[in-house]
Image: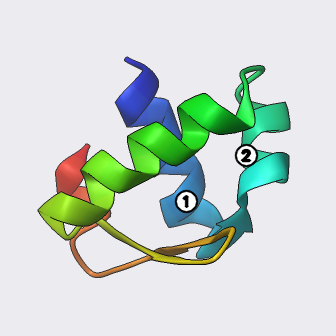
Amino acid sequence: MFRNEFLQIVWERGRVDVPELARLLNTTEDLIEAEADVCAAQGWIRMLDSLIMATPLTDTGR
């Protein structure tokens, strides 16, 4: 469930920074970064420092 919400927000916004996403999902930045690492390894998102960006695969990861 968390991953679906995570990817949905990234997909809808196109890009979002880690602190904002943590606030939106009511969780810690550490948890967001850990989930981002997993999703980036699958190609569902891209990470650039603290910025999370959607990829064409973001919508299919949900």
| Amino acid at the residue labelled 1 | Val
Q: Is residue 51 above or below residue 1?
A: below
Q: Quickly name the residue at label 1.
A: 10
Cβ atoms under marks 1 and 2 closer than 8 Å: yes
Q: Residue, x 73% and y 46% (percent of image)?
A: 21
The answer to which quarter of the image holds residue 1 is: top left
Q: Is residue 30 left or right of residue 24?
A: left
Left/right placement of residue 60 relative to residue 6 reads left
Q: CA distance from mark 1 to mark 2?
A: 8 Å
Camera-side residue: 58 or 28?
Answer: 28
| Helix, strand or loop status at disc 1 | helix
Q: Indicate which disc, 1 or 2, sits on the residue closer to the N terminus.
A: 1
Q: Which residue is mark 2?
A: 21
Between 4 and 47, the one lying in front of the other is 47
* Residue 3 spot, x, y in % from top left: 37, 32
Q: Which residue corresponds to the image point at 70% horizontal and 28% vertical from the top-left?
A: 25
Q: Residue at x 30, y 64 (%)?
A: 40
Type of the residue with mark 2:
Leu
